[in-house]
Image (tube, rainbow, N blue to C red):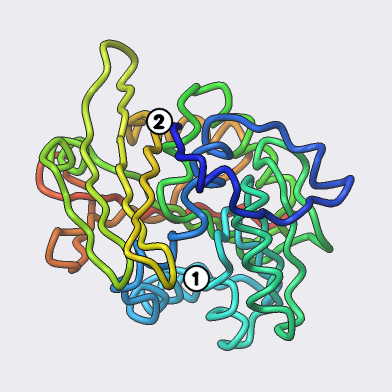
Amino acid sequence: MTTTPADRATPTPTPSPVDQAVSADHAAVAYDATAPFYDSLTRHDNYDVFADLLEGLIKQAGPAGTRLLDAGCGTGRSSVLFAGRGYRVTGFDISASMIGIARTRHADSGIDFHVHDIRRPAPGEGPYDVVLCMSDIVNYLVDPAHLAEAFARLSAAMAPGGVLVFDANTALGYDLMREPHIVRDDGLFAVLTGKHLASGGRYQLTMDAFRAEAGTDHWTRSTVEHHQAHHSQDRFATLLEAAGLRLTARHGLHISGSLSDGVDESAHTKGLYAAVKPPTA
Protein backbone atom coordinates (compact mmCIF):
# COMPACT_ATOMS: atom_id res chain seq x y z
CA MET A 1 0.00 0.00 0.00
CA THR A 2 1.25 3.47 -0.89
CA THR A 3 -0.34 6.62 0.51
CA THR A 4 0.17 10.33 0.19
CA PRO A 5 1.15 12.49 3.20
CA ALA A 6 -2.45 13.71 3.36
CA ASP A 7 -3.67 10.11 3.65
CA ARG A 8 -1.26 9.38 6.48
CA ALA A 9 -2.58 12.38 8.33
CA THR A 10 -6.19 11.11 8.21
CA PRO A 11 -7.22 10.14 11.77
CA THR A 12 -8.27 6.54 12.36
CA PRO A 13 -10.19 5.12 15.30
CA THR A 14 -8.03 4.04 18.25
CA PRO A 15 -8.55 0.29 18.75
CA SER A 16 -9.28 -1.16 22.16
CA PRO A 17 -6.72 -3.47 23.84
CA VAL A 18 -8.74 -6.44 22.55
CA ASP A 19 -8.73 -5.01 19.04
CA GLN A 20 -4.97 -4.51 19.13
CA ALA A 21 -4.50 -8.28 19.48
CA VAL A 22 -5.50 -8.71 15.82
CA SER A 23 -2.45 -9.11 13.61
CA ALA A 24 -2.20 -6.68 10.70
CA ASP A 25 -2.05 -9.20 7.86
CA HIS A 26 -2.47 -8.26 4.20
CA ALA A 27 -6.28 -8.09 4.36
CA ALA A 28 -6.21 -5.83 7.42
CA VAL A 29 -3.70 -3.52 5.73
CA ALA A 30 -5.72 -3.38 2.51
CA TYR A 31 -9.04 -2.65 4.18
CA ASP A 32 -7.63 -0.17 6.69
CA ALA A 33 -6.51 1.80 3.64
CA THR A 34 -9.79 1.25 1.76
CA ALA A 35 -12.12 2.00 4.69
CA PRO A 36 -12.42 5.80 4.18
CA PHE A 37 -13.98 5.28 0.74
CA TYR A 38 -15.26 1.68 0.90
CA ASP A 39 -18.92 2.69 0.98
CA SER A 40 -18.38 4.93 -2.05
CA LEU A 41 -16.82 2.01 -3.92
CA THR A 42 -19.83 -0.19 -3.14
CA ARG A 43 -22.48 2.53 -3.25
CA HIS A 44 -24.30 1.01 -6.20
CA ASP A 45 -24.39 -2.55 -4.81
CA ASN A 46 -27.96 -3.57 -4.07
CA TYR A 47 -27.64 -5.00 -0.58
CA ASP A 48 -31.38 -5.66 -0.28
CA VAL A 49 -31.52 -7.84 -3.37
CA PHE A 50 -28.46 -9.82 -2.32
CA ALA A 51 -29.83 -10.19 1.21
CA ASP A 52 -32.94 -11.77 -0.33
CA LEU A 53 -30.71 -14.37 -2.02
CA LEU A 54 -28.82 -15.08 1.19
CA GLU A 55 -31.96 -15.31 3.29
CA GLY A 56 -33.37 -17.79 0.81
CA LEU A 57 -30.38 -20.07 1.44
CA ILE A 58 -30.70 -19.55 5.19
CA LYS A 59 -34.38 -20.49 5.21
CA GLN A 60 -33.74 -23.48 2.98
CA ALA A 61 -31.26 -24.79 5.57
CA GLY A 62 -33.80 -24.19 8.34
CA PRO A 63 -31.69 -23.20 11.37
CA ALA A 64 -33.51 -23.34 14.70
CA GLY A 65 -32.75 -19.78 15.81
CA THR A 66 -31.89 -16.27 14.65
CA ARG A 67 -28.50 -15.61 16.24
CA LEU A 68 -26.31 -14.45 13.33
CA LEU A 69 -22.56 -13.88 13.05
CA ASP A 70 -21.56 -11.50 10.24
CA ALA A 71 -17.96 -12.59 9.63
CA GLY A 72 -16.19 -9.84 7.72
CA CYS A 73 -18.94 -7.28 8.26
CA GLY A 74 -16.99 -4.31 6.91
CA THR A 75 -18.70 -1.02 7.73
CA GLY A 76 -21.78 -2.84 9.05
CA ARG A 77 -24.24 -2.35 6.19
CA SER A 78 -25.08 -6.05 5.94
CA SER A 79 -25.20 -6.43 9.73
CA VAL A 80 -27.81 -3.68 10.08
CA LEU A 81 -29.78 -5.07 7.16
CA PHE A 82 -30.11 -8.51 8.75
CA ALA A 83 -30.83 -7.03 12.17
CA GLY A 84 -33.74 -5.25 10.50
CA ARG A 85 -34.98 -8.63 9.28
CA GLY A 86 -35.22 -9.97 12.80
CA TYR A 87 -31.79 -11.57 13.31
CA ARG A 88 -29.73 -11.09 16.49
CA VAL A 89 -26.48 -9.94 14.90
CA THR A 90 -22.86 -9.86 15.98
CA GLY A 91 -20.36 -8.48 13.47
CA PHE A 92 -16.60 -8.64 13.11
CA ASP A 93 -13.91 -7.62 10.66
CA ILE A 94 -10.13 -7.86 10.61
CA SER A 95 -9.85 -4.14 9.76
CA ALA A 96 -9.92 -1.80 12.75
CA SER A 97 -10.76 1.11 10.44
CA MET A 98 -13.77 -0.66 8.97
CA ILE A 99 -15.03 -1.56 12.44
CA GLY A 100 -14.44 1.98 13.64
CA ILE A 101 -16.82 3.21 10.94
CA ALA A 102 -19.37 0.47 11.77
CA ARG A 103 -19.34 1.34 15.48
CA THR A 104 -19.75 5.06 14.82
CA ARG A 105 -22.32 4.84 12.04
CA HIS A 106 -24.47 2.18 13.70
CA ALA A 107 -23.99 3.12 17.36
CA ASP A 108 -27.75 2.96 18.00
CA SER A 109 -28.27 -0.42 16.32
CA GLY A 110 -27.51 -2.56 19.36
CA ILE A 111 -25.10 -4.63 17.26
CA ASP A 112 -21.83 -5.66 18.91
CA PHE A 113 -18.96 -5.04 16.46
CA HIS A 114 -15.52 -6.60 17.00
CA VAL A 115 -12.09 -6.28 15.41
CA HIS A 116 -11.27 -9.93 14.95
CA ASP A 117 -9.31 -12.44 12.86
CA ILE A 118 -11.53 -15.16 11.38
CA ARG A 119 -8.86 -17.77 12.18
CA ARG A 120 -9.41 -17.28 15.92
CA PRO A 121 -12.30 -18.42 18.15
CA ALA A 122 -15.39 -16.42 17.23
CA PRO A 123 -16.31 -13.38 19.36
CA GLY A 124 -19.65 -12.53 20.90
CA GLU A 125 -22.33 -14.69 22.44
CA GLY A 126 -22.66 -17.87 20.43
CA PRO A 127 -23.44 -20.46 19.45
CA TYR A 128 -24.70 -18.97 16.19
CA ASP A 129 -27.53 -20.31 14.08
CA VAL A 130 -26.36 -18.44 10.98
CA VAL A 131 -22.86 -17.39 9.89
CA LEU A 132 -22.41 -15.10 6.89
CA CYS A 133 -18.96 -14.87 5.32
CA MET A 134 -19.37 -12.69 2.25
CA SER A 135 -17.42 -10.34 -0.08
CA ASP A 136 -14.57 -12.70 -1.06
CA ILE A 137 -13.40 -13.28 2.52
CA VAL A 138 -12.47 -16.90 1.83
CA ASN A 139 -10.37 -15.72 -1.13
CA TYR A 140 -8.35 -13.42 1.13
CA LEU A 141 -7.29 -16.57 3.02
CA VAL A 142 -4.65 -17.30 0.41
CA ASP A 143 -3.08 -20.20 2.32
CA PRO A 144 -5.35 -23.29 2.27
CA ALA A 145 -4.23 -24.02 5.84
CA HIS A 146 -5.65 -20.65 6.92
CA LEU A 147 -8.91 -21.40 5.11
CA ALA A 148 -9.12 -24.74 6.92
CA GLU A 149 -8.51 -22.98 10.22
CA ALA A 150 -11.23 -20.41 9.50
CA PHE A 151 -13.81 -23.08 8.63
CA ALA A 152 -12.94 -24.96 11.82
CA ARG A 153 -13.33 -21.83 13.96
CA LEU A 154 -16.65 -20.92 12.37
CA SER A 155 -17.94 -24.48 12.74
CA ALA A 156 -17.02 -24.46 16.43
CA ALA A 157 -19.06 -21.27 16.86
CA MET A 158 -22.17 -22.70 15.18
CA ALA A 159 -25.14 -24.33 16.86
CA PRO A 160 -26.13 -27.84 15.71
CA GLY A 161 -28.31 -27.38 12.64
CA GLY A 162 -26.71 -23.99 11.96
CA VAL A 163 -25.81 -22.80 8.47
CA LEU A 164 -22.73 -21.11 7.03
CA VAL A 165 -23.28 -19.07 3.85
CA PHE A 166 -20.26 -17.76 1.93
CA ASP A 167 -19.25 -16.57 -1.51
CA ALA A 168 -16.07 -17.05 -3.54
CA ASN A 169 -14.66 -15.73 -6.78
CA THR A 170 -14.50 -18.07 -9.76
CA ALA A 171 -11.82 -18.43 -12.42
CA LEU A 172 -13.97 -16.32 -14.76
CA GLY A 173 -14.34 -13.62 -12.11
CA TYR A 174 -10.58 -13.32 -11.83
CA ASP A 175 -10.09 -13.34 -15.60
CA LEU A 176 -12.57 -10.47 -16.02
CA MET A 177 -10.77 -8.36 -13.43
CA ARG A 178 -7.59 -8.38 -15.51
CA GLU A 179 -9.21 -5.59 -17.51
CA PRO A 180 -9.20 -2.21 -15.76
CA HIS A 181 -12.43 -1.32 -13.95
CA ILE A 182 -13.31 2.28 -13.17
CA VAL A 183 -15.51 3.38 -10.27
CA ARG A 184 -16.77 6.98 -10.08
CA ASP A 185 -18.62 8.57 -7.19
CA ASP A 186 -18.88 12.07 -5.73
CA GLY A 187 -15.34 12.96 -4.74
CA LEU A 188 -13.93 9.58 -5.78
CA PHE A 189 -12.30 8.18 -8.93
CA ALA A 190 -10.86 4.67 -8.62
CA VAL A 191 -9.16 2.38 -11.13
CA LEU A 192 -8.94 -1.34 -10.30
CA THR A 193 -6.66 -3.68 -12.24
CA GLY A 194 -5.96 -7.32 -11.47
CA LYS A 195 -3.33 -9.85 -12.46
CA HIS A 196 -2.64 -13.53 -11.90
CA LEU A 197 0.53 -14.31 -10.00
CA ALA A 198 2.90 -17.14 -10.77
CA SER A 199 1.82 -19.88 -8.38
CA GLY A 200 -0.90 -21.33 -6.20
CA GLY A 201 -3.84 -19.64 -7.91
CA ARG A 202 -2.74 -16.32 -6.40
CA TYR A 203 -4.18 -13.06 -7.63
CA GLN A 204 -3.38 -9.39 -7.01
CA LEU A 205 -5.83 -6.52 -7.40
CA THR A 206 -4.29 -3.05 -7.45
CA MET A 207 -6.55 -0.09 -6.77
CA ASP A 208 -5.56 3.51 -7.45
CA ALA A 209 -8.06 5.75 -5.70
CA PHE A 210 -8.21 9.51 -6.16
CA ARG A 211 -10.24 11.45 -3.58
CA ALA A 212 -11.24 15.11 -3.56
CA GLU A 213 -10.23 17.06 -0.47
CA ALA A 214 -13.25 18.83 0.96
CA GLY A 215 -13.32 22.56 0.31
CA THR A 216 -10.30 22.53 -2.01
CA ASP A 217 -9.39 21.79 -5.61
CA HIS A 218 -6.88 19.17 -4.49
CA TRP A 219 -7.10 15.41 -4.84
CA THR A 220 -5.17 12.76 -2.91
CA ARG A 221 -4.11 9.40 -4.30
CA SER A 222 -4.00 6.05 -2.50
CA THR A 223 -2.63 2.87 -4.06
CA VAL A 224 -3.85 -0.26 -2.33
CA GLU A 225 -3.00 -3.89 -3.10
CA HIS A 226 -5.48 -6.68 -2.38
CA HIS A 227 -4.15 -10.25 -2.42
CA GLN A 228 -6.42 -13.25 -2.98
CA ALA A 229 -6.29 -16.88 -4.08
CA HIS A 230 -8.69 -18.96 -6.11
CA HIS A 231 -9.95 -22.04 -4.22
CA SER A 232 -11.58 -24.96 -6.01
CA GLN A 233 -15.00 -26.34 -5.15
CA ASP A 234 -13.36 -29.65 -4.23
CA ARG A 235 -11.17 -27.81 -1.73
CA PHE A 236 -14.20 -26.15 -0.17
CA ALA A 237 -16.02 -29.49 0.16
CA THR A 238 -12.98 -31.23 1.67
CA LEU A 239 -12.16 -28.49 4.18
CA LEU A 240 -15.78 -28.02 5.20
CA GLU A 241 -16.13 -31.75 5.85
CA ALA A 242 -12.93 -31.71 7.92
CA ALA A 243 -14.48 -28.86 9.95
CA GLY A 244 -17.61 -30.88 10.64
CA LEU A 245 -19.80 -29.12 8.08
CA ARG A 246 -21.76 -30.53 5.15
CA LEU A 247 -21.87 -28.59 1.87
CA THR A 248 -25.56 -28.50 0.96
CA ALA A 249 -25.90 -25.84 -1.77
CA ARG A 250 -23.82 -24.44 -4.60
CA HIS A 251 -25.11 -21.65 -6.81
CA GLY A 252 -23.38 -19.74 -9.59
CA LEU A 253 -23.76 -15.99 -9.87
CA HIS A 254 -23.91 -14.65 -13.43
CA ILE A 255 -22.53 -11.24 -14.33
CA SER A 256 -26.19 -10.21 -14.82
CA GLY A 257 -26.87 -10.90 -11.12
CA SER A 258 -28.97 -14.03 -11.64
CA LEU A 259 -28.30 -17.36 -9.87
CA SER A 260 -27.97 -20.87 -11.28
CA ASP A 261 -27.86 -24.27 -9.63
CA GLY A 262 -24.27 -25.45 -9.59
CA VAL A 263 -21.11 -23.37 -10.04
CA ASP A 264 -19.47 -23.22 -13.48
CA GLU A 265 -16.00 -21.70 -13.14
CA SER A 266 -16.06 -20.59 -16.78
CA ALA A 267 -19.60 -19.16 -16.84
CA HIS A 268 -20.19 -17.62 -13.39
CA THR A 269 -18.34 -14.75 -11.77
CA LYS A 270 -18.93 -15.98 -8.20
CA GLY A 271 -20.04 -19.07 -6.38
CA LEU A 272 -22.52 -18.86 -3.51
CA TYR A 273 -22.33 -21.76 -1.04
CA ALA A 274 -24.21 -23.04 2.01
CA ALA A 275 -22.89 -25.55 4.53
CA VAL A 276 -24.81 -27.01 7.47
CA LYS A 277 -23.57 -28.26 10.83
CA PRO A 278 -25.39 -31.57 11.37
CA PRO A 279 -27.73 -31.71 14.37
CA THR A 280 -26.51 -33.66 17.36
CA ALA A 281 -28.00 -37.08 17.93
Which x, y percent locates residue 34? 46, 50
For the residues marked 1 and 2, what is the alpha-carbon distance in whole angstroms?
29 Å
Indicate whether 51 appears above or below 244: below
The amino acid on which the numbered mark 2 sits, given as a three-letter code, is: His
**Foreground of the two, 254 or 177:** 177
In the picture, measured across the screen, residue 278 lies left or right of residue 185, that is right
Residue under numbered circle 1:
58
- Quadrant of the rendering where the C terminus is positioned: bottom right
Q: Sort mark 2 into few (<14), some (14-19) or many (20+) by Cα contacts within 10 Å.
A: some
**Foreground of the two, 149 or 95:** 95
Q: Sort mark 1 into few (<14), some (14-19) or many (20+) by Cα contacts within 10 Å.
A: many
Residue found 42% across the figure and 63% down from its top: 213
> Quick one: label 1 or label 2, which is nearer the N terminus?
1
**Foreground of the two, 35 or 82:** 35
Q: Is residue 255 visible?
A: yes
**Foreground of the two, 224 or 128:** 224
Name the element at disc 1: helix
Which x, y percent locates residue 117? 68, 41
Residue under numbered circle 2:
227
- Quadrant of the rendering where the N terminus is positioned: top left
Residue found 62% across the figure and 82% down from its top: 83
Quarter occupied by residue 40: bottom left
Name, please, the residue furthest toward the right: 17
In the picture, measured across the screen, residue 229 lies left or right of residue 109, that is left
Name, please, the residue furthest toward the top: 198
Which x, y percent locates residue 125? 84, 63
In the picture, measured across the screen, residue 30 lies left or right of residue 102, that is left
Query: In front of the other: label 1 or label 2?
Result: 2
